[in-house]
Image (cartoon, grey):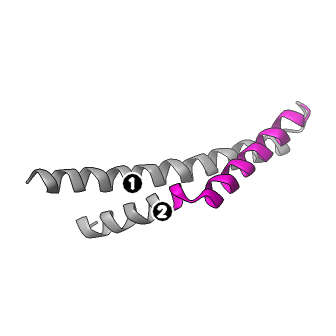
């Protein structure tokens, strides 16, 4: 991936991470799935698996956006030091 693409993706990621609607939506979905998991019975394996994997997927999305923002910041810092 070209440096400019990384910067553009990082900028877009920062925008999403700072967006309150995005933050609230992701957190609400994670909370809902945690509640589904906690309120399920130990024998409801399918329900628990779906809730767990959905929560993990949402966390992975946020982590990926944070990583892209960090990569942008590193490139920008490196370019400033040159």
Main SS, magenta region, reads: helix
Which residue appears at 63% of the width and 51% of the height?
Answer: 58
Going by the image, does 70 lie left or right of 35? left
- Residue 25: percent from the left, percent from the top? 69, 56
- Is residue 2 visible in this depiction of the protein? no
List the residue tagged with mark 2. Answer: 15
User: Where residue 5 sits: x, y (%)?
Assistant: 31, 69
Residue at image coords 75%, 43%: 31
Q: Residue at x 26, y 69 (%)?
A: 4
What residue is pinned by disc 1? 69
Residue nearest the observer in this picture, 43 or 56: 56
On screen, residue 19 versus residue 25, left or right, reads: left
Task: Work out whether residue 33 or residue 26 is closer to the camera in this orientation and state it.
Answer: 26
Of 29 and 77, the residue lying toward us: 77
Q: Residue 47, percent across and down? A: 84, 45
Give residue 69's position: percent from left, percent from top.
39, 54
Magenta residues, as a range?
15-41
Q: Residue placed at 48% from the left, 62% from the top?
A: 15
Left or right for 80, reference 51: left
Query: Are there few (<14), some (14-19), or many (20+) residues within 10 Å of tag 2?
Result: some
């Amino acid at each position: 991936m070209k440096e400019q693409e990384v910067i553009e993706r990082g900028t877009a990621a920062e925008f999403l991470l700072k967006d309150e609607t995005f933050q609230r939506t992701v957190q609400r979905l994670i909370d809902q799935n945690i509640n589904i998991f906690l309120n399920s019975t130990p024998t409801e394996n399918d329900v628990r698996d779906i809730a767990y994997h959905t929560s993990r997927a949402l966390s992975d999305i946020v982590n990926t956006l944070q990583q892209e923002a960090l990569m942008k910041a590193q490139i920008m810092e490196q370019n400033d030091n040159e």
